[in-house]
Image (cartoon, rainbow, N blue to C red):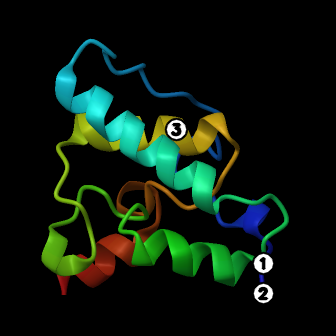
């Protein structure tokens, strides 16, 4: 089993950083507040990778762009980037699986 550092964050794992979303946007501010709150309650460095990823998936943060019926949050790309930024800010892996992992896109396509 890969530890949480090997799960990828959706950003940072490629060595790049997304453009920061405008914090004045009320929707972005709401998403940022929600994800920060969730991370504060749930993220613990050193948590076993499978346990952490299960939490991220159950909370629908792993695939924020996917529709809710597919365990996503139905977020627009710019709002999903807010999620990825917040996960990266605390160095928590798991967000952005809908963009950066082939398995996620393959499942959605079939």
Place of residue 35 in the rendered image (x, y in percent of width and height, measured from the top left): 44, 47
Q: Secondary structure at mark 2?
A: loop
Q: Quadrant of the N terminus?
A: bottom right
Q: How many marks?
A: 3
Q: Point out which mark residue 1 bears.
A: 2
Q: Residue at x 31, y 79 (%)?
A: 106
Point out the tag, 1 or 3, that comes first from the N-terminus: 1
Place of residue 70 in the rendered image (x, y in percent of width and height, measured from the top left): 21, 78
Q: Secondary structure at mark 3?
A: helix
Q: Is residue 3 left or right of residue 52?
A: right
Q: Residue at x 66, y 52 (%)?
A: 92
Place of residue 19 in the rendered image (x, y in percent of width and height, measured from the top left): 41, 20
Place residue 71 in its image quadrant: bottom left
Q: What residue occupies the far right of the structure in this picture?
A: 46
**Any part of residue 8 in sight:** yes
Q: Is residue 5 left or right of residue 66?
A: right
- Number of the front mark, 2 or 3: 3
Q: Are marks 1 and 3 in contact (CB under 8 Å)?
A: no
Circle 1 residue: 48
Q: Are marks 1 and 2 in contact (CB under 8 Å)?
A: yes
Q: Point out which mark residue 86 bears.
A: 3
* Above or below, 97 relative to 28: below
Q: Residue at x 30, y 57 (%)?
A: 64
Place of residue 80 in the rendered image (x, y in percent of width and height, measured from the top left): 31, 44
Q: Quadrant of the C terminus?
A: bottom left
Place residue 74 in its image quadrant: bottom left
Q: Point out which mark residue 12 bears.
A: none
Point out the tag, 1 or 2, that comes first from the N-terminus: 2
Point out the tag, 2 or 3, that comes first from the N-terminus: 2
- As measured in the structure, the alpha-carbon distance from the residue carrying label 1 to the one carrying label 3 is 20 Å
Q: Secondary structure at mark 1?
A: loop
Q: Are marks 2 and 3 in contact (CB under 8 Å)?
A: no
């Amino acid at each position: 089993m890969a530890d949480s550092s090997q799960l990828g964050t959706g950003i940072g794992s490629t060595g790049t950083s997304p453009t920061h979303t405008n914090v004045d946007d009320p929707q972005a501010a709401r998403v940022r507040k929600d994800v920060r709150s969730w991370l504060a309650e749930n993220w613990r460095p050193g948590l076993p990778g499978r346990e952490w990823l299960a939490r991220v998936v159950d909370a629908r943060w792993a695939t924020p762009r996917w529709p809710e019926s597919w365990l996503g949050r139905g977020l627009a790309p710019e709002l999903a980037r807010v999620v990825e930024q917040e996960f990266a800010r605390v160095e928590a892996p798991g967000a952005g699986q809908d963009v950066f992992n082939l398995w996620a896109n393959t499942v959605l396509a079939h």
